[in-house]
Image (cartoon, helix red, strand yellow):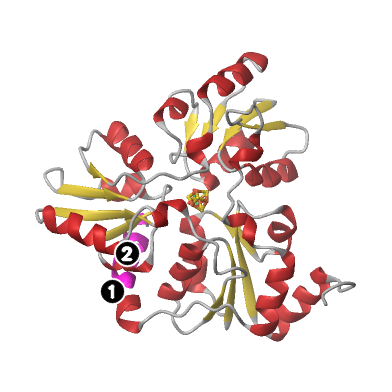
Amino acid sequence: SLKGLDLRAEIDRLRKERNAVILAHYYQTPDIQDLADFVGDSLDLSRKAAATDAEVIAFCGVRFMAETAKILSPDKIVVLPDMDAGCSLEDSCPPDQFRAFRERHPDHIALSYINCSAAVKALSDIIVTSSSAEIILSQIPADQKIIFGPDKHLGGYLARKTGRDMLLWPGVCIVHEAFSETELLKLKAQHPGAPVLAHPECPPHIIDHADHVGSTKSILDYALASDAETLLVATEPHIIHQMEKAAPHKKFIGAPGADGNCNCNMCPYMALNTMEKLYVALRNLQPRIELDEDLRAAAQKPLERMLEMAG
Ligand code: 13P
Ligand code: SF4
């Protein structure tokens, strides 16, 4: 039994013993964010995973992120505290259907959001994150036709912002899909002048009210640089932990769902990782990401292209 164990101390002991680095996404619980060696958005987490000297990467995030770490750092052991930590965007895009979609549009290149399986990455030309999509798009010739998947909201946002007409795969993030425009407008009325910060996975009726749209890292940076005393945050609310730590005098309010509170906007997949499971993963070096080498190598190419084009 794990009862009575000082999990934080045990994790610290194991991370040294195993020569492990603990990488965490902003949507993890505060206890995990606080012990991680690095907390970041999808792009920065990929960069860290590609560059680490550690022998083990303990990835506190969802499976596509841990897979990305393994694709970029194949010689490392990559553990994920809970292998069921999936993503609704990944689920929306089965590789066989994506292959058929590509085959119906042979004159298009496939730009894929990193929130997809290794198999979909292997079928893609370039991977993007929300923080790198615009700079990558700007390097693709204007007459080049593009398929964008699996997030139709990120794709739609990019199309509106850059004027590029892209064929969109119809996937959504269930977390960002759940924000309520009516409740957000109520909140704005209660906090006049409070800027709205939104992730581009939000649907357009939320983006339309945003003062800043960007990745988790970009939302965090904007929140900390802003002069505003109160800010409304339309992304998964665990990122507010970093905001409160860095700016304890400011008020950060999570955007609500239809029930008027922000609890329905917690990512159920991210929530599967716990301190207990992280401890067990470091102790057992399981559950471990294992990928077929041909698949891994095929998925590496569009990811390396992302890292080059993102600069
Ligand atoms: P970023 O941290 O790259 O903005 O991604 C957000 C997200 O939903 C990850 O699942
Ligand atoms: Fe997937 Fe959305 Fe959860 Fe991110 S927040 S892992 S996009 S379901």
Q: Is residue 28 above or below residue 60?
A: above
Q: Nearer the viewer, residue 126 or 235?
A: 235
Residue 249: % across, % down? 78, 33
**Residue 228, image quadrant:** top right
Q: Is residue 301 magenta?
A: yes
Residue 121 marker: 2
- Is residue 91 visible in the rendered image? The answer is yes
Amino acid type, mark 2? Lys
On the image, the x and y values in percent for residue 281 come to 65, 77
Residue 289 location (% of width, % of height): 49, 77
Q: Is 30 left or right of 147, judged from the image as shown?
A: right
Residue range in magenta is: 298-310
Q: Is residue 130 left or right of residue 156?
A: right
| Residue 125 seen in the current view | no
The residue indicated by pointer 1 is 298
Q: Which mark is residue 224?
A: none
Q: Residue at x 28, y 47 (%)?
A: 169
Q: Main secondary structure of the magenta part?
A: helix
Label 2: how many residues lie within 10 Å, few (<14), some (14-19) or many (20+)?
Answer: many
Classify mark 1: helix, strand or loop: helix
Q: Residues within 10 Å of mark 1 (few under 14, many from 20)?
A: some
